[in-house]
Amino acid sequence: MAASNELLTYILEQLAGSVKNILHPSLYERTLREIGVQLGREIAKQTERAPTAEALFRQEDYLRCLELMKKQIGWNHRITQKAENRIDLSIPQCPFGKLPAEDPHFCQLEAGLLGGIAGDHFSYAKVEICRGQGVPLKNCSLTVHLEQTPHNTTVEGATFQSVQASAKQSQTLAHMFSQLFPREQQVIRLLGAGFPNKEIGNTLGLSVRTVEGHLARVREKTDLHTRRALIRWAVQMSSNLS
């Protein structure tokens, strides 16, 4: 199993290095999360369900998935708190070697592993990550929220939803994009492709101030009031429209 884990780490390291050089950071993070989600789903397929008359996936089933991860990828996580609709974990040492210490975005793969399974089965999940220190990282902590609450909507973390919920969200995002003027759509496409305001202006023959004006109007129309939120949405739209 150790050799298998080393091979997995090597493959992920090579993949991450190649992808990082060609993608916008936000899209790179999303790609790593998707890789984690797919790995998590494969593990979930192998998990024995808790004996129950109900067909629903339960928190006990999710915990079994986490235990199986320990065997499949050598994850040494510990469940430090198991509350209703929330699971806290600690990771004494990162199972992916030195890569996450050198590349903070790589932690999104772990978020995908944890959140993808939960999002599929509980319709919603949010993964908080508190990075540790050292190389490899030591004493990281993670919290998986299995239900949306006023509190966890304010914390930093990746959000995961079921396929049905994600499809509905994509329709909403596409509708928001369709409400923009053609020039605003062009600006958003370039923003999602990783262009800073100056390069957007140069590409479209606009001044930086005009680009900023378009982005300000887009923020008003979409109710995305921070640049970070606007970039995240632009990256999603750029990916969906490509």
Image: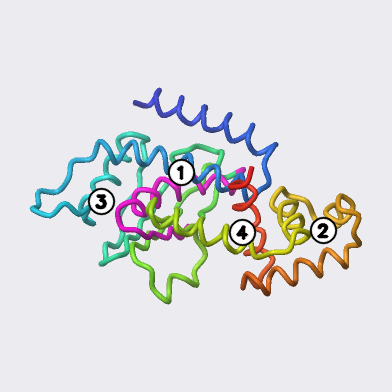
Label 1 to label 3: alpha-carbon separation: 19 Å
Q: Earlier along the polypeptide chain: callout 2 or callout 3? A: 3
Q: Nearer the viewer, mark 1 or mark 2?
A: 2
Q: Amino acid at mark 2?
A: Asn
Label 2 to label 3: alpha-carbon separation: 45 Å
Which of the 4 image quarters holds residue 80? bottom left
* Callout count: 4
| Mark 2, secondary structure of its residue | helix
Q: Nearer the viewer, mark 1 or mark 4?
A: 4
Q: In the rendered view, would you say 219 is above or below 37?
A: below
Q: Which residue is mark 1?
A: 94
Label 2 to label 4: alpha-carbon separation: 16 Å
Judge the density around disc 1: few (<14), some (14-19), many (≥20) Cα neighbours within 10 Å: many
Q: Amino acid at mark 3?
A: Leu
Q: Earlier along the polypeptide chain: callout 2 or callout 4? A: 2
Check residue 233 in the rendering and tell me which mark sits there, or answer none: 4
Question: Which residue occupies 9% across, 52% down?
Answer: 52
Q: Earlier along the polypeptide chain: callout 1 or callout 2? A: 1
Q: Amino acid at mark 1?
A: Cys
Check residue 197 in the rendering and tell me which mark sits there, or answer none: 2
Pointers 1 and 2 in contact (C-beta within 8 Å): no
Label 1 to label 4: alpha-carbon separation: 30 Å
Residue 218 % position (x, y):
70, 68
| Mark 1, secondary structure of its residue | loop
* The residue stretch that appears in magenta: 102-129
Residue 70 % position (x, y):
32, 40
Q: Which residue is mark 3?
A: 63
Label 1 to label 2: alpha-carbon separation: 37 Å
Q: Nearer the viewer, mark 2 or mark 3?
A: 2
Q: In the rendered view, would you say 190 is above or below 23?
A: below
Pointers 2 and 4 in contact (C-beta within 8 Å): no
